[in-house]
Image (cartoon, rainbow, N blue to C red):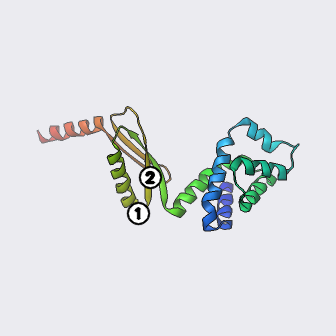
Amino acid sequence: MIVLKYTKALLLALKEDEILEVFEAIKKLALVAKNPKFVLLVKSPMLSIDEKVEILKKIAQSNNQKFANFIKILLENKRIDLLKEIYQSLYEAVCKHFNKYEGVVEGKIEEATLKALEEKLSKEFDASINLKLKESDINGIKVFVDVLNVEYSILEDRIKQELMNQILKAI
């Protein structure tokens, strides 16, 4: 609940052209937030909040003042540990805002098939969907688009079983 409030407040404060810049900055911080040194840095009583903000701005490679103010508020309210959750919430909100989503296809398929899947899903959900291929040794393919809660799987074994069932029903 708190994460959603911070996400909503941040998005309301940003202009359209600032959203992606700030999102990328928060993404960089969320990636390093797992590091124990990062935790020591943000919780250190030896550094002032302003010094911490400057260090975090350098890590995120952002000079956006609204981003700096947001980080300062998180530090002042001792909510910096919510950074990963805020990033995930912001990711979903940004995807919905721009109507662009990313997904993963597991299996072995050709580039043309991947593009055809992207087009079909984009058309079905009336959104721009970009799929990345993650090759694996499964007999078939699996498609995941997390933000849209989409999961499709076409497995060779399942198709064979369904064909056998259809043949048995026909007999």
Q: Quadrant of the C terminus?
A: top left
Q: Residues within 10 Å of mark 2 (few under 14, many from 20)?
A: some
- Mark 2 secondary-structure assignment: strand
The answer to whether residue 5 is above or below residue 47 is: below
Outermost residue on the right side: it is 46
Q: Check whether the beta carbons of the residues at disc 2 and disc 1 lie within 8 A of each other.
A: no
Which residue corresponds to mark 2? Answer: 130
Location of residue 37 (image quadrant): top right
Q: Quadrant of the N terminus?
A: bottom right
Residue at 35% of width from left, 37% of height from top? 108
95 left or right of 83 in image: left
Numbered circle sitting on residue 126: 1
The answer to whether residue 127 is above or below residue 152 is: below
The answer to whether residue 132 is above or below residue 65 is: above
- Between 101 and 153, the one nearer to me in the picture: 101
Q: Residues within 10 Å of mark 1 (few under 14, many from 20)?
A: few
Residue at 79% of width from left, 52% of height from top? 53
Location of residue 166 (image quadrant): top left
Residue 13 locus on image (x, y percent): 68, 66
95 left or right of 119 in image: right
Residue 63 locus on image (x, y percent): 72, 57
- The kind of residue on which mark 1 rests is Asp
Numbered circle sitting on residue 39: none
Residue 31 locus on image (x, y percent): 64, 43
Residue 11 locus on image (x, y percent): 64, 63
